[in-house]
Amino acid sequence: MNSRITLTLVFSALLVVGSAPVGLGSKNPAPAQQNEAKKDARRYYCVMDPEVKANKPGTCPKCGMTLRAAKAEAPGDSGANKNANETNDADAIKDYARPGAIPDTPISDQDGRKLHFYSDLVKGKTVAINFIFTTCTTICPPLAATFRRIQQEMGDRVGRDIALISISVDPATDVPQRLKAFAAKFKAGPGWTFVTGNKPEIERLLNALGAAVTDKNDHTPMVLVGNEPSGYWTRTYGLAPAAILVKVITDAAAKSGARGAAGEIHLPGSANLGARVAGD
């Protein structure tokens, strides 16, 4: 009798002890899932090339743009169809149609003419703006060559209802004479303006356009395209084929209606060149 009771107690104890790992094991997936969720929340990607991903903040190694923090989105959803005011996207175009958003910075062009950026180059026009410096040996020559092809493909529209603008991110070096020589190298014609000026003023202009950099070599190949009369602004990848940029510029020029229309962002290689991301 005693041995039968003893065996029963031992068997019961073994069941209790044996169940403990099972109970603990059942709780293990929760912390693991939480850690995975936290890891996902720390992921970042490039708005110009969603294939570029990172686990910490930084800039895209391809285009130099600030990486966007990934949100809890459906697989494959880059967030490009969301309003920038909802996603708090640091790279999204916001409020460019607001009066004063594009500063009327005093600038000089490649011919040494003293101009004001907004009133002389942007107001009343459809513009494409890129960012270069004359001593650059990496992305600047291709950016300028693409603008040259755009000028060729768009013909006399450039200088009439379309304006191309190249802003130097190294104004201390890029005096008008240097810009003029650089422009001549790429056979820049009427309607393509190269911009320089007082360094603090140009830095404020670059900051307003979302293109300010600490190191000139880190500048972005982004191109801003805007239809100032309609308040339509968009961003595209400056190293994309010229045909894509021509389409972006042509589409922007065709925009009409009230100022403050939503902007768009264009991803290289994407069939969806009209993903809405920014509201003004």
Image (cartoon, rainbow, N blue to C red):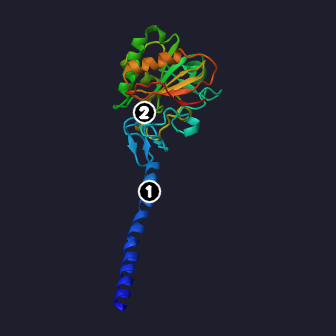
Most distant residue in the front direction: 1
Residue picked out by circle 2: 48
Measured along the vertical axis of the image, is residue 168 above or below residue 11?
A: above
Three-letter amino acid code of the residue under disc 2:
Met
State which quarter of the image contains the N terminus.
bottom left
The mark found on residue 98 in the picture is: none
Front of the two marks 2 and 1:
1
- Which badge, 2 or 1, comes first in the chain's sequence? 1
Nearest to the observer: residue 102 or residue 78: 78
Q: Which quadrant of the structure image shows residue 138?
A: top left
The image quarter containing residue 3 is bottom left
Q: Is residue 251 visible?
A: yes
Q: Position of residue 187 (x, y in %)?
A: 38, 15
Q: Quadrant of the C terminus?
A: top right
Q: Residue at x 58, y 38 (%)?
A: 86
- Tell me the amino acid under the disc marked 1: Asn
Q: Residue furthest bottom?
A: 2
Q: Which residue is mark 1?
A: 35
Name the foreground residue: 71 vs 258. 71
